Image: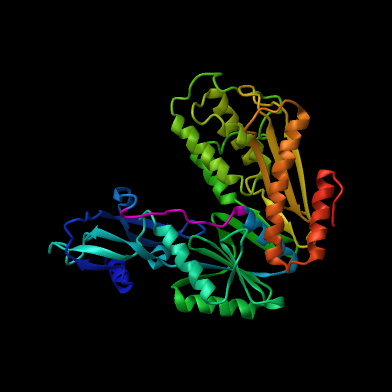
């Protein structure tokens, strides 16, 4: 706690002032946590001071709260290109990232417990954001984004969390997810310059070669880059007491038809919701369970025993190969292709169809989706047309993202359009 207070005061996070009569000070509290390493061993004990952001008043203590984060698809596209181009991948972590954001609003907070000035009738006027303030993440991203732009970085318009600097073979890319940063590029010297520049502005933790990112496990080899969530999968099986169950070979029976009001109610519906939420996170590297998990998410408001049994089958399927994931091949070609399909009227309760599509960058799977359509389709052709429309929207966004990685030229655009048109079965118009 003492170290945390010293760090906050060294960062000029607040000024001790009397509370103005027209203002109300928000509360704060301490959170104690044991931080673990990637292998599960203890790294350190940490005390963090957080604000009671739930007591803030909208329009007075904060205005906007939205902050962009990198799309998982962008991460996979970056890995797919890095595998083919043999790029270096370095991971950084910003220490106390949210404390770097400057506050635009006038916010007062109670003096935290353990501070020597606590009993003198003063309050803290926050000059920089604090963890759990409603606008903390937004102010941090604004600070980080403006700093990069001032230092010559270019921001991607398809994903605002992606930046680039340099040109030609020395072009370097930077991807940020809150306080986790990936630096990618072919020129290691240029990457070191970017790292040193960031280190001179923010307090960084250099994590070396990219191996773990957002709970994802990455392994680099001559064949490419593999992406798995083995540790997360085993932890999920252990928490649900299904490690000793017999594995199955399919995540969901093809003939299984689930209804919303069929079967007995589950005693603890919140446990079902937590389980489905964890399975949804697992779909980042497991496209083979995406369809089954999407079906099960439709019953989270009122889960019943057949739904829980279907979820347990997904877990037993995961036990069959907990380390399975996706491989971004190093021998792949950087050609974009996408496939779409639809399951007409598959929902027995609403008679809506299910959209499904997947996109490949060469041989590497970079994005996929399975989602129930918002309206009822009157024919299988209409359902497939809606699915194709969603896939086309995704591929248009992917083209914009890929053009940020590669210099946009008419030739590159034509090649991408030809692949798009051939994938959905129409003749390209290139006038």
Is any part of residue 68 visible from this angle?
yes
Is any part of residue 333 visible from this angle?
no
Query: Is 256 left, or right, of 236 in this rendering?
Result: right
Residue 70 located within the stretch drawn in magenta: yes
Quadrant containing the C terminus is bottom right
Magenta residues span 60-72
Query: Is 342 left, or right, of 316 in this rendering?
Result: right
Residue depicted at x 36% and y 58%: 131
Residue depicted at x 64% and y 22%: 348
Residue 421 located within the stretch drawn in magenta: no
| Residue 280 spot, x, y in % from top left | 57, 42
From the viewer's perspective, is residue 67 above or below residue 203? Answer: above
Residue depicted at x 25% and y 58%: 109
From the viewer's perspective, is residue 139 above or below residue 309? Answer: below
| Residue 269 spot, x, y in % from top left | 46, 29
Residue depicted at x 68% and y 57%: 226
């Amino acid at each position: 706690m003492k170290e945390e207070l010293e760090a906050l005061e060294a960062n000029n996070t607040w000024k001790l002032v009397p509370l103005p009569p027209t203002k109300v000070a928000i509360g704060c509290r301490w959170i104690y946590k044991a931080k673990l390493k990637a292998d599960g061993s203890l790294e350190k004990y940490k005390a963090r001071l957080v604000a009671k952001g739930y007591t803030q008043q909208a329009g007075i203590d904060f205005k906007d709260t939205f902050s962009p984060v990198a799309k998982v698809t962008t991460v996979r596209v970056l890995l797919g290109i890095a595998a083919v181009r043999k790029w270096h991948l370095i991971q950084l972590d910003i220490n106390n990232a949210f404390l770097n954001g400057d506050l635009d609003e006038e916010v007062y907070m109670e003096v935290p417990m353990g501070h020597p000035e606590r009993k003198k009738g003063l309050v803290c006027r926050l000059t920089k954001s604090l963890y759990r303030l409603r606008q903390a993440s937004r102010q941090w991203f604004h600070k980080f984004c403006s700093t990069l732009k001032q230092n010559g970085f270019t921001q991607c318009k398809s994903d605002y969390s992606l930046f680039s600097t340099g040109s030609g073979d020395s072009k370097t890319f930077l991807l940020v997810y809150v306080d986790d940063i990936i630096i990618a590029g072919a020129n290691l010297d240029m990457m070191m310059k970017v790292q040193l520049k960031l280190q001179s502005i923010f307090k960084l933790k250099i994590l070396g070669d990219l191996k773990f990112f957002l709970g994802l496990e990455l392994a680099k080899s001559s064949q490419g880059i593999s992406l798995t969530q083995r540790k997360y999968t085993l932890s999920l099986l252990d928490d649900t007491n299904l490690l000793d169950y017999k594995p199955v070979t399919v995540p969901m029976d093809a003939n299984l038809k689930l209804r919303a009001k069929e079967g007995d109610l589950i005693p603890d519906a919140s446990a079902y919701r937590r389980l489905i939420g964890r399975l949804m996170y697992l779909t980042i590297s497991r496209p083979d369970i995406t369809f089954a998990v999407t079906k099960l998410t439709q019953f989270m408001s009122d889960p019943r025993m057949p739904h829980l049994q279907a979820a347990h089958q997904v877990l037993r399927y995961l036990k069959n190969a907990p380390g399975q994931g996706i491989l971004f091949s190093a021998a792949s070609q950087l050609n974009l292709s996408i496939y779409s399909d639809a399951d007409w009227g598959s929902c027995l309760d609403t008679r809506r169809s299910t959209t499904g599509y997947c996109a490949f960058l060469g041989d590497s799977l970079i994005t996929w989706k399975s989602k129930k359509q918002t309206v009822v389709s009157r024919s299988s052709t209409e359902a497939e047309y809606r699915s194709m429309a969603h896939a086309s929207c995704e591929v248009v966004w992917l083209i914009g993202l890929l053009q940020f990685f590669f210099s946009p030229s008419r030739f590159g655009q034509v090649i991408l359009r030809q692949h798009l048109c051939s994938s959905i079965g129409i003749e390209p118009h290139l006038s």
